[in-house]
Image (cartoon, helix red, strand yellow):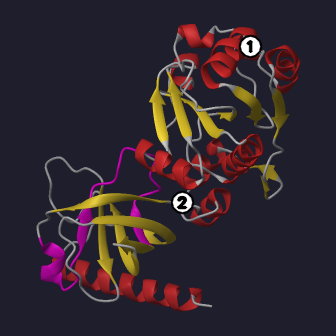
């Protein structure tokens, strides 16, 4: 998959293309429906499946503040590649982009820049100046521009359309089950193991320490999770938080993972976390022995969770 930064020019896409437009933060079930349709339409054309997205969230300009990301840009691009996209075009969202008319957007970006023959829009898509770029507007413009525009119906979960905002709300509330149903997969992230103080090892529960990326996190606490190391999944207990029982001058979020199926050499490894169940809130313990007992109870709860989860 290729990534193009900036406004596309003739030749950016190779041959005719099917184009879908959006922020695509989180790559949830609604996004997947758009991407699958885009891939199908591109195959019909014998051309490329193109995602047109933005270098920064439009809300930063439109509302003065962007919502927290659900995933890193790296994870997003990885997911788009797995969905079969050929090209991702990331354009700046500035005053010039905001004020483009639908006609100019269609002519200069879709047709001239991307060779668009099929435009795939979400059910509530409305872009360009004054949100005039609706399905109906692009269908009309497509008659002279040589492309067709189609709408993908919403994906409903619990009777409501799946959206990134609904996922953020559920994640803030710690409702991992709902988040997973909206995403179509468990929520998580990946990161590289960093050197730690070896306190977990001293307590009898060695941990791998990973700094979480700058994305929206669920409430601090202890979770049952699957940790993937070199394509192998391990059941684990994960503490996500600031470790109030461990003195620190500048506490920052840390993810501490204890694998339940035995120790492993994890130094410098990249771990992928899939958070499955909330076990308890993060607490400050008066002594290391009290902390040790709490971790043992956490491991027992997690073991029970994984035993129940087995088919």
Category of crowding for the residue at label 1, using alpha-carbon neighbours closer than 10 angstroms: few (below 14), some (14–19), many (at least 20) = many
Decide which of 123, 281 is in the foreground and name it. Answer: 123
Residue that label 2 marks: 174
State the extent of the magenta-drawn residues as a range. 198-223
Which residue position is annotated with label 1? 102
Q: Nearer the viewer, residue 274 or 67?
A: 274
| Image: 285 above or below 23 | below
Quarter assignment of residue 180: bottom right
Q: Quadrant of the C terminus?
A: bottom right
Question: Which of 18 and 55 lies nearest the eye of the viewer?
Answer: 18
Query: Image check: 29 left or right of 71?
Result: right
Q: How many marks?
A: 2
Q: Magenta span has 206? A: yes
Q: Is residue 248 magenta?
A: no
Q: Position of residue 168 (x, y in %)?
A: 57, 47
Q: Compared with residue 232, is residue 272 higher up or lower down, i.e. above or below? A: above
Residue at x-position 47% and y-position 21%: 6
Crowding around mark 2 (Cα neighbors within 10 Å: few <14, some 14 to 19, many 20+) is some
Pick the front one: 41 or 134: 41
Would residue 243 be seen by someone viewing this image from the given angle?
no
Position of 275 with respect to 127 (left or right) is: left
- Specify the label residue 3 is tagged with: none
What residue appears at the point 54 percent right and 21 percent down from the top-left corner? 8
Task: Judge whether 37 appears above or below 19 on screen.
Answer: below
Percent x, y of residue 100: 65, 9
In the shown orientation, is residue 86 left or right of residue 272? right
**Residue 292 occupies which quadrant of the picture?**
bottom left
């Amino acid at each position: 998959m290729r990534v193009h930064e900036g406004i596309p020019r003739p030749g950016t896409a190779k041959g005719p293309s099917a184009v879908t437009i959006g922020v695509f933060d989180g790559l949830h079930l609604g996004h997947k429906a758009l991407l699958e349709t885009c891939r199908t339409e591109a195959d019909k054309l014998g051309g490329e499946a193109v995602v047109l997205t933005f270098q920064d969230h439009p809300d930063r300009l439109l509302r003065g503040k962007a919502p927290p990301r659900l995933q890193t840009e790296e994870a997003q691009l990885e997911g788009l590649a797995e969905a079969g996209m050929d090209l991702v075009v990331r354009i700046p969202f500035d005053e010039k982009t905001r004020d483009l008319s639908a006609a100019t957007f269609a002519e200069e970006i879709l047709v001239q820049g991307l060779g668009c023959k099929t435009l795939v829009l979400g059910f509530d898509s409305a872009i360009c100046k004054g949100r005039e770029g609706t399905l109906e507007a692009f269908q009309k413009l497509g008659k002279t521009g040589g492309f067709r525009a189609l709408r993908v119906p919403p994906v409903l979960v619990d009777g409501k359309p799946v959206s990134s905002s609904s996922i953020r709300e559920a994640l803030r509330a710690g409702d991992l089950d709902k988040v997973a149903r909206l995403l179509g997969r468990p929520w998580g992230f990946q990161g590289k193991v960093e050197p730690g103080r070896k306190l977990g090892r001293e307590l009898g529960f060695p941990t791998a320490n990973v700094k979480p990326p700058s994305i929206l996190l669920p409430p601090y606490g202890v979770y049952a999770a699957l940790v993937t190391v070199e394509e192998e999944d391990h059941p684990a207990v994960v503490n996500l938080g600031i470790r109030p029982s461990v003195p620190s001058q500048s506490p920052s979020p840390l993810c501490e993972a204890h694998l339940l199926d035995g120790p492993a050499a994890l130094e410098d490894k990249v771990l992928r976390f899939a958070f499955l169940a909330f076990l308890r809130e993060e607490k400050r313990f008066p002594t290391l022995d009290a902390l040790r007992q709490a971790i043992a109870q956490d491991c027992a709860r997690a073991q029970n969770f994984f035993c129940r989860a087995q088919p």
